[in-house]
Structure formats: C-alpha cells, structure tokens
Amino acid sequence: MSKFIFVTGGVVSGIGRGITAASMAMLIKAQGYTVDIVKLDPYFNVDSLYLSPYQHGEVFVTDDGGEGDLVIGHYERFLDQNLTENSNITSGKIYLSVINREREGGYDGESVQVVPHITDEIKRTLYTFSRPETDVVVCEIGGVVGDIENHPYLEAIRQCRGELGKNNAAYVHVTYVPIIEMSGEHKTKPTQNSVKELQNIGIQPDIIVCRSDCPLDAESKGKLALFCNVSSDGIIESVTTDNLYQVPLKLREQNFAGVALKKLKMDEREPDLGAWMDMCARAEKAKKAKKRLRVAVVGKYTEKVTAYQSLTDALKTAGLLRNAALDISLVACADVEKDINVLNGFDGIVIGPGFGERGFDGKIIAAKYARENDVPCLMIGLGAEAGLVEFARNVCKMTGASSQEFDEKTPYPVVNYSEPKMLKKGAFPSLITPGTYLNRIYGGMAIRERHRHRYGFSAIYEQLFLKNGLVFSAHSPTGVPEAFEIPTNRFFIGTIFHPEYTSRLLSTHPLFTEFVKVISK
C-alpha cells in the first residue's frame, strides 16, 4: 500500500503550495523511494482545454494528452518523470463521473449528495494512485481552507486517514505569515485561524510550512507550535526567494521530508542531491555574471509571466548548463506590431505558442526581423506557423499566404487544418530529415514530442519552400511536416510541437541547449 502526503493551503493563494508539494516529492524521491504526485483542483473545468493563460498561467500537456494546470509542469521538472492526465483531477472530472454514473442507474435509486457520493469518488480517484510500485503519493489540494469549492476535498482527505491508517497519511499545511513592516513583527494569527478551520473539519496538520518574506524568529515558531498543536520540528519556514530551485534545499535544511517520513513510519535515507546542488550553484553564479545574454520571448500573454512558464524554465536551465546568464524579456506581439525596434539588442528571439488571431501579425513581423537580421530564432507552435507564413509571403512571393484558421479563403493555405479535424495533443513520433541541422541537434532521426495544435504545416508547398531555401526537417510518420529550418541562418528553426514541455531542470531539451549555445558565441 502506498503512503499519502496531503498538502493544503491557508490564508491566501499563490504562496507556492505547488512548489512545496513538488519539493516534498523530489526530496523523498532523492532518498530512493518511488513517488507519484497529483493535483486536486476545485475548478469545474473538466481540464484546462479552454482555460485562458490569464487564469492560471500556461496549460501544460502530458505525454498522454492530458491538459492541466501549470503546476503539473513544475511537478514533472522537479521529479524528472512523466505524469499523466490523471495527475490533474478537477471538480469537473469528479462531478461528471458521478453524474454519468447516476444517469446509468449506478446509485440504485439513492439521492446523490456531496457526502458520501462526491467524497467517495474523490477517494476512489486518489486510491488509483496506490500501487505496489509506488511508495509515496504526494497530493496537493487546490484552493485555500475556507473556500466553499474545496471543502469536499478536505472532507475526503479527512476520511482517508481513517481508511488508510494513521501511519499511512500525513498532512502538510502551507500558510502565509505576514510581517508588519513598521515593527518588523511576524503575525501568526492568520495561520492559527487557518489551522483551526482545518481542525474544525477534522484534520490536524503534522507540518506547517510558513511562507514569509523574512525568516521567522524563535518566538513566532514556538507560538505556532503551541497554538496549532504541532511539534516544534513540524514548523517549517519557507522564505521568499527569486530562485525556485533553492526551495527544496532550504526545506531540506529543516528536515522537511524527514518529518513527513517519520510520521509515515518510513526510514529516512541520505538523499542524492548532487546534481540539484550543482544546478543551484550555477544559478547563484549566473546571478552575479557581468556578461548576460538577452533573449526576447515574443507572445501575446506577456502580462502573465507564468503563461510561458515551461518556456522560460527551459531557457534558464539551458543557460545554466552552459554557465551562461540569461536575461529573458517577455515582448508583447502588439508592441512588435507598433515598433519593430523593440527587438533591437537581443541576442536571440523565441516566438512563443498560443491560440487565436490576436498577435499573429506581431509574430510574423518578429520572424521576418529574425530571418533578415540573422538573429537566432526558435519558433514554437503558433509562433512557427507565423514564421512559415512570413517566409511564404516575403521570400516565396506567395501573396496572401496565411493560415486557414484566420483566412479560410487564402490562396496559399501554408498552414491548414490537421487531419483529423481535431486538437492534436500529447506525445507523437516524428522522423527527422537526414543531414539537417535538426538531425545534428537531436543526434538521431526518430523523436517523440508533445503537441497541442489544431492546425499544422501544409505539405503541398514543400518543394517550393525547399527551392527558396527553407527545409522541412521533421515529418510525422504519415508525411505531414512538423519542423522547418533555414540552413543559411545561424539558427532559424520552427516546430509545430512543443519542446518546452519535455525540458527538465537537470536535462534541458537539446533544442534549447543548442539555441543558447549559438547565442553564446
């Protein structure tokens, strides 16, 4: 039977509960245990298919086509393992399952209620993660204690300890401890109230992680331990940092995972954190570097930094692996449309993915700028579609060339609807064209990358593009183009697939590694 660690949040949202859960999972895995991780979200969206990045940041896609919260990306990068669509459970999924069962007569005429039917479905879903090969399951509960939306989840995990056994479930509560600037005094009352609300539900936290902008003093820790009925070693501080990679190491210094393992009656082992510590050391060195590489990420969701979380993480870690310091700027497509000079001075340009027509012209302009000025440029998803349209219009002289998504009557549909006419999502195989730059980057000819798009490159014009200097360097097994490059440029590559989804903190995707290598020269 797998052990469960439940991570809840209190006081306010957005204080790093997902990073805390990922850190717990990573620290336990580093000790040689097998770990899985799941996010329970109180939203009634079935998945993140139609969620705007302005809501919760990027939509992250798993190998099996699951679309989840950006925190699933953090989980994969911290744990360095693939998750599945089941790793993000929403209220939409839970309630839909219950309603479908009711419609099929599965409740034998009972009145279907939140308790026990919704809570039972939550537990049933959670218990599917309990497998012989999995030692520990870390489960993050979305929302904040006190929210009406997540109360069924809290009731369900309360019941879990009774069903699993007291040594098979542990509770971690992540709260915010504000500090009064005038006096420099930490205020513990919000955390005390949050814990009392948990206790009223029937959950006694074993660990309280206190997020604060400054280290907690001994008096504040003692007060929290006393009034929240938590042992002193269960009061863990998590001080604000500009380097997320340091969080697990800071938590380890306070024996964060060790306290949880003790509660679960599991042996604490010496963790293997050498590679992680090396990465953090490189990050600290990069912060002090005088020579810095400037990279522009062109997109339309630039008001929300987390809309490009996987992309910026991939760039940063690619820089760290090459001991290069990157300064990444999010540049709005609208600003590029107004003045192309906003791209002056950048060492490299990444034209990001997205959906919808707004901002597409800005991406086309950015691709033209990069191509004509030989600025290293990586284009992904809709960004790659824009790059292909730009080349068709300005090099191949295909007047009116466009994507059928935005112009159904275009005379040159260089970007057309994928077949079958549905969203292609998840990991699919591609074959790389021998002798291409992409072939050298990957070091092989067969790859598997994650997709999230409805439209793709048209194969009809492949020979015309080749004649004008653009090579389709990867194709699906059925011959549909999936990547292109211009061999005469230093680095001008577009991919319909999303390499950022599979880039990891300790093993950056080769496309990002090569991109940083080129702009470093």
Image (cartoon, rainbow, N blue to C red):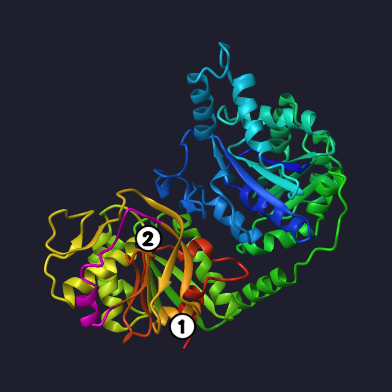
Identified by mark 2, the residue type is Pro
Quadrant of res 333: bottom left
**Residue 468: % across, % down:** 21, 81
Residue 234 vs residue 464, the one in the foreground: 464
Number of residues whose C-alpha sits closer than 10 Å to that of mark 1, classed few (under 14), some (14–19) or many (20 or more):
some
Residue 457 lies in the magenta-colored region? yes
Please identify the quadrant where the N terminus is shown. top right
Disc 1 to disc 2, how far (Cα)? 24 Å
- Judge from the rendering whether residue 291 lies leftward or rightward of residue 181; answer left or right: left
- CB of mark 1 within 8 Å of CB of mark 2? no
* Residue at 31 percent of width and 87 percent of height: 488
* Sequence-first tag of 1 and 2: 2
Q: Is residue 366 visible?
A: yes
Number of residues whose C-alpha sits closer than 10 Å to that of mark 2, classed few (under 14), some (14–19) or many (20 or more):
many
Residue 367 lies in the magenta-colored region? no
* Residue at 46 percent of width and 36 percent of height: 45
Quadrant of res 197: top right
* Magenta-tinted stretch: 452-470
Identified by mark 1, the residue type is Arg
Residue named by callout 2: 353
- Secondary structure of the residue carrying tag 1 is helix
- Judge from the rendering whether residue 140 lies leftward or rightward of residue 31; answer left or right: left
Vertical side of 125 occupied by 452: above or below:
below
**Residue 294: % across, % down:** 44, 76
Residue named by callout 1: 440
* Residue at 74 percent of width and 31 percent of height: 160
